Amino acid sequence: MNGDDDSTGSVGNGPVIVLVEPQLGENIGMVARAMANFGLAELRLVNPRDGWPSEKARAAASKADHVIDAVQVFEGLAEALADLNFVVATTARQRDGFKRVASPVEAGRVLRSRCRSGQRTGILFGRERFGLYNEEVALADEIVTFPVNPEFASLNIAQATLLMSYEWMKSGLEAETDTAFTSPEVVPAPKEHLHGLLDHLESALDARGYFRPAAKKPKMLDNLRAVLTRPGFGLAEIKVLRGVISSLDYFSPRKPRGAGYPDRKAEADEALHGDGDYRRKPAVLKGEDGND
């Protein structure tokens, strides 16, 4: 991930989130939580209906207390935007005027670029019921709209904030596909282990009459090999599969694991090691239970 200072969420680094006349403390709290999720910390409220501070907002913020504690309240929108150099206004409706309309992806990149150049930026959100008035949108530099279902285009302010905060965070990554953690690297196992798995499976299926008619066995084996060689199994994965096959091959409901040493297991061990003393040894070879 990118180590840019402007992605840390410190006040003054990322865009300011501005809510115009928010109604419910719970909504404000969920906005704060969404901001904290993606590294934003500066929240401004314009004439909140139920006043401020709000314990309902703090509870809904789910420990995003640093956002709640830093909230600033303004009587008018112009005052809330006065120290900002660049502001985008979110809306779900077509607006009259000459302002550029951007997608959240574009807006995130523009905001990132301007923040890196030292500008103070903001993202403007309207009321829960009907959004922003045209004269409020006019105070912004650009419009942002979301690619939503036109038959159900309404987003609540927490959802809209989450989308914009996500695009802000994503724009600061070295690659936009970066994630907070990655899957473990799986190195394909040496072929001898894969061949052992295939041989074991063939033997188990042979014992149960799977290859019928016999003339089709070569083609059926080809299909099994194609399926099992495609994933590129790691050694640990092959051990898991060997453990599953062993359990199904050597044991049964009448003679489950722990009930004694199965005949087919003894025969397999004899063929593998040439030692007829296997009935006194554990019924699982190292790794065949999928745990080693």
Image (cartoon, helix red, strand yellow):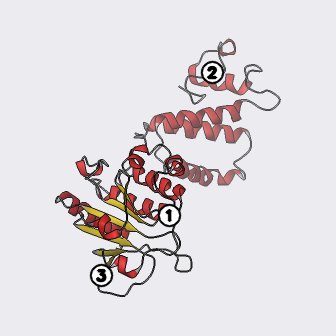
For the view shown, which residue lies furthest in the left direction? 117
In the image, is residue 174 above or below residue 286? below
Precedes in sequence: disc 1 or disc 3: 1
Disc 1 to disc 2: CB gap under 8 Å: no
User: Which mark is drawn over residue 99?
Assistant: 3
Count of all numbered marks drawn on residues in the image: 3
Image quadrant of residue 245? Answer: top right
Residue kind at label 1, given as amino acid type: Arg
> How busy is the neighbourhood of tag 2: few (under 14 within 10 Å), some, or many (20 plus)?
some
> How busy is the neighbourhood of tag 1: few (under 14 within 10 Å), some, or many (20 plus)?
few
Residue kind at label 2, given as amino acid type: Glu
> How busy is the neighbourhood of tag 3: few (under 14 within 10 Å), some, or many (20 plus)?
few
Label 1 and label 3: CA atoms lie apart by 29 Å
What residue did someone put label 1 on?
Answer: 49
Precedes in sequence: disc 1 or disc 2: 1
Q: Nearer the viewer, mark 2 or mark 3?
A: 3
For the view shown, which residue lies furthest in the right direction? 254
Task: Kindly state the secondary structure of the residue where label 1 is placed.
Answer: loop
Task: Kindly state the secondary structure of the residue where label 3 is placed.
Answer: loop
Residue kind at label 3, given as amino acid type: Lys
What residue did someone put label 2 on?
Answer: 270
Viewer-closest of 108 and 253 = 108
In the image, is residue 88 above or below residue 228? below
Label 2 and label 3: CA atoms lie apart by 81 Å
Kindly identify the residue that appears in the image at 23 percent across and 48 percent down.
5
Kindly identify the residue that appears in the image at 60 percent across and 55 percent down.
219
Judged left or right of residue 218, residue 189 is left
Task: Kindly state the secondary structure of the residue where label 2 is placed.
Answer: helix
